Image (spheres, coloured by chain):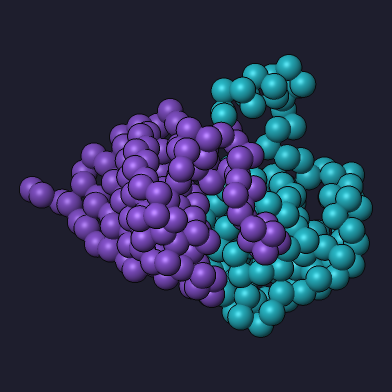
Chain colours: A cyan, B purple
Amino acid sequence: MNLLEILNILNASLLTQQLPLQKTVDRAYCADLMSDVLSFSVTKSLLVTGLTNAQVVRTAEMAAIEVIVFVQGKRPDIQTIKLAEEKRIPLLVTDFSMFDACGMLYERGLRSQFHHLNQEQFMTWRKESS
Amino acid sequence: MNNSEEGFFFLTGKDFTNAGVASSNLKGVLERRGVRQDIVRRTAIAAFEAEMNVIIYAVAGTMKYRITDTEISVTIQDMGQGIPNIELAMTEGYSTAPDYIREMGFGSGMGLPNIKKSTDSLLVNSVVGEGTTLEFLIRLKSGDKEQA
């Protein structure tokens, strides 16, 4: 899914400037706990979150996350936006709630990294990864 | 030919504005060296978790790294409160973080387990009231530890 599609589906605004709009993501993950993001997210993914501090951008940088969407209309401060521009990570804001935003993206085909696993496989993976 | 490289960064406790800068710089060093992307990612994640621990819990600390042709070793040493029970701290979900840290998205008790998961070896030494030293190693040749 590409950045323009995400903007469109979530009726979102782009907060960062002068970043290429051609970005695409393969997977999505949502959390407000940054350690969960660092632990379970994958590269080339979209992060949906309600947290708007600079650590979210830092987390995305470390975890090689491509795009961040802030939900519930929450906007980060200007320093956080500048940091994201520097790290070339587009920031989006949508008025939808976390649940609805994720639901809309899912409905349009975006999936998590766990999607290919059935419940049993997921539980096995969870056991092995901890 | 000796192709090793080392350096270090200072970390300041409670300086949340610069939290992550050291790990970001280390990530940059690895990228410039052409280290494989999944290994860069694992190192950056482990370094960032460790850096956040210093920012959250300690007065100050350092992050030292050494990169050779075969491995990356990172040592994070802090002057802080120390960890009374390391085994407990290694348990997923165990945390002593105050609420304002949780509101920032950290302190959910995943830090040390996540560092262990991301690295090939991890050593934690801690003296209560003095500080903690955390040393992790990531092999450059390994390819089998990539996370799902």
Task: Please tell me which residue is depicted at 37% across the width and 37% down the height of the picture.
Answer: B122
* Image height of A86 relative to A26, above or below: below
* Image height of B53 relative to B93, above or below: below
The answer to whether any part of residue B36 appears in the image is no
Q: Is residue B118 left or right of residue B10?
A: right
The spot of residue A41 in percent (x, y) is: 63, 44
The spot of residue B100 in percent (x, y) is: 67, 64
The quadrant holding residue B124 is top left
| Closest to the observer, A54 or A86 | A54
Task: Please tell me which residue is depicted at 57% across the width and 58% down the height of the picture.
Answer: A59
| Closest to the observer, A2 or A61 | A61
The answer to whether any part of residue A38 appears in the image is yes
Which image quarter holds the C terminus of chain B?
top right
Task: Please tell me which residue is depicted at 56% across the width and 28% down the height of the picture.
Answer: A129
The spot of residue B31 in percent (x, y) is: 37, 57
| Closest to the observer, A125 or B51 | B51
Q: Residue furthest front?
A: B129
Task: Please tell me which residue is depicted at 77% across the width and 21% down the height of the picture.
Answer: A119
